[in-house]
Image (tube, rainbow, N blue to C red):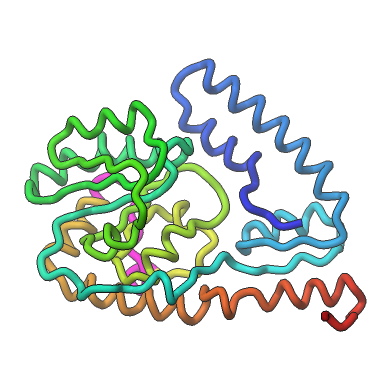
Amino acid sequence: LSTHNIESQRFARELKLASWSFRRVVLQADQWLFGDWEKKTVRRFHGAIAVSEQDRKWLQERLAGRPVALAPNGVDTTYFRRQSPFPVNPVTIVFTGVMDYPPNEDAVLWFAEKVWPWLRHRRPELVFQIVGTRPTARIMALAAQAGIVVTGEVPDVRPYVEQALAFVVPLRSGGGTRLKILQAMAIGCPVISTRLGAEGLTVGDRDDILFAEQPGEFVARIEELKSLPETGSRLAVSARALVLRQYDWRSCLGAVDRLYDELLGGETRT
C-alpha cells in the first residue's frame, strides 16, 4: 500500500471551511465513508509506504505492527532547475496546480480576496498569476480583477515559476505533501506557504521557506522579498540545496527497496 492523500483527513479539513449547508453535508458524508473505507482497506496489506512522517504515524496506528516505510515525495532536479538568471526586478507572484481541486480553489480564492487587494494597493506593479489546468468559473472570474492573470493549462510551468518574485501556497486544507513546493524550490523560486501547505516537508522558516498564515503575514513576506532581493536569493540557493540533499528522486526511494526486501524475506531482486 502506498499513500497519496488520506482522504478522510482532507474532507475533515475542508469541512471546517465549508460555509454552506449542502456542501457541509456532502463533506461530512465523504469523511465518514472514506474513513470507514480506509480503516477496512489498510488491514488488507502486509506493509505500506508513506510520503510524510504524519502519514507514517497514521498508517502505523492502523497496520498493527506491520512495516511502514517512509519514502518522501521527490522531484527530478535535472528537469526542475533554473534555466535563466534570477530576474533583476521580478513583479509576478505565482500559484500552480489543478484548479478544480477544492483545496487549490479555496487557497486561490482566499488569497485573491484577503491578500491581493491589500498587496495591490501597496505594490500596484505586482501581478498574480494563477497557472494550472481546469480553472473553475470562480477562478476564471478572478481575471476581472486588476493584476490577476488566469492562464489555464500551460505546456510548461517552469518559465512562470523561475521568473516569479515568489511562489505562494496559501493552502488551508488538503493532505499529503505538495510536489509543487519541491518543484519551485528545485527551480530556485522563493516559496511562501502556510504551515499546512508545507506539511510533511522538512523545511525551516526563513532557512528554506517563508511561512505565513494571516493575510498581513503574506503581505509582509512578499514586501520583504520585493524590498530585500538578497533574501530571495538566499532562500533560492538554500531551498535548491535542500531538495538536492533530501528530495531528489535518486536518493529518496531507498526505503522502498528496503521494505520490499523485508516483505519478501530478503530475496535478491532481479
- Position of residue 164 relative to residue 124, above or below, is below
Residue 232: x percent and y percent?
23, 70
Give the dominant element type of the magenta stretch: helix, strand or loop. Answer: loop
Looking at the image, residue 24 sits to the left or right of residue 270; the answer is left
Range drawn in magenta: 205-217
Q: Does the magenta stretch include residue 192?
A: no
Q: Considering the image in quadrants, where does the N terminus appear?
A: bottom right
- Which of 59 and 138 lies nearest the eye of the viewer? 138
Q: Considering the image in quadrants, where does the C terminus appear?
A: bottom right
Looking at the image, residue 74 sits to the left or right of residue 134; the answer is right
Image quadrant assignment for residue 48: bottom right
Q: Is residue 213 magenta?
A: yes
Image mark count: 0
Residue sitting at x 78%, y 55%: 61
- Which of 170 and 128 lies nearest the eye of the viewer? 128
Residue 105: x percent and y percent?
40, 37
Residue 134: x percent and y percent?
41, 37
Looking at the image, residue 126 sits to the left or right of residue 72; the answer is left
